[in-house]
Image (cartoon, helix red, strand yellow):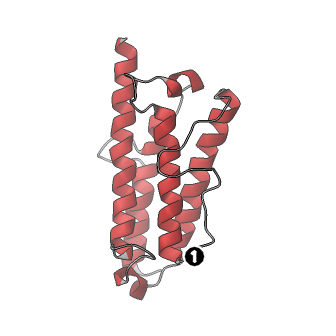
């Protein structure tokens, strides 16, 4: 594998699962969070952890569609960006949505691993960003929302 692609994969995976000097990666922030905790909101019209999990899963799917230039790739849930929570937001649904996030990460990981060095400089499909920028961006997106989740967990403890 080309060194640049390997580095992008490392950055991408580090933001989601790998131990890192910057702190807890996204997957680590939801470890041990119950469905009830995932639904807690710090105020009206504020996002909860569950919202953030679906949002990050959605954007992993969209970045994969852009990288592969495949219009048939669609997120397996209705909606876009900020999706509706399940009608019955219980433990089973929370588990399914965490698994959905894992699945979208794996699928995007596979897409990135299949890139050739020449692909890195081209623009993503229907995107103004180059492929390597999309990958750095989705890793940064995971870290941004990991920080939000950590803050929500702290605020939840103080209520």
> Crowding at label 1, few (<14), some or many (≥20) Cα neighbours within 10 Å?
few
Residue found at the very far top of the displayed protein: 159
Residue plotted at (48% across, 45% down):
82
Q: Is residue 59 above or below residue 45?
A: below
Task: Give 114 or 93, whichever is nearer the viewer.
Answer: 93
Residue found at the very far left of the displayed protein: 22
Image position, residue 142 (x, y; %): 40, 50
Residue plotted at (52% across, 51% down):
57
**Secondary structure under the numbered disc 1 in the rendered image:** loop
Image position, residue 133 (x, y; %): 33, 70
The residue carrying mark 1 is 70
Taking the image as drawn, is residue 142 in sight?
Answer: yes
Task: Give 132 or 76, whichever is nearer the viewer.
Answer: 76
Image position, residue 92 (x, y; %): 70, 32
Residue plotted at (66% across, 27% down):
91
Taking the image as drawn, is residue 17 in sight?
Answer: no
Q: Is residue 118 above or below residue 11?
A: below
Image position, residue 105 (x, y; %): 54, 56
Residue plotted at (56% across, 48% down):
101
Identify the image quadrant of the C terminus: top left
Q: Is residue 124 above or below residue 99?
A: below
Q: Is residue 69 left or right of residue 10?
A: right
Q: Is residue 2 left or right of residue 111?
A: left
Q: Is residue 107 above or below residue 88?
A: below
Q: What is the total number of numbered labels drawn onto the structure image?
A: 1
């Amino acid at each position: 594998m080309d060194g640049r692609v390997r580095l992008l994969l490392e950055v991408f995976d580090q933001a989601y699962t790998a131990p890192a000097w910057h702190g807890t990666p996204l997957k680590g922030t939801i470890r041990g969070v119950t469905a009830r905790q995932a639904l807690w909101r710090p105020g009206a019209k504020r996002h909860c952890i569950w919202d953030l999990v679906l949002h990050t899963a959605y954007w992993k799917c969209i970045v994969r569609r852009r990288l592969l230039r495949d219009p048939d790739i669609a997120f397996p849930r209705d909606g876009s960006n900020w999706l509706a929570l399940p009608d019955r937001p219980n433990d089973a649904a929370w588990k399914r949505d965490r698994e959905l996030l894992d699945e979208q990460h794996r699928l995007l990981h596979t897409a990135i691993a299949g890139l050739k060095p020449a692909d890195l400089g081209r623009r993503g499909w229907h995107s103004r960003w180059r492929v390597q920028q999309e990958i750095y961006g989705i890793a940064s997106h995971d870290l941004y929302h990991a920080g939000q989740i950590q803050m929500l967990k702290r605020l939840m403890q103080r209520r």
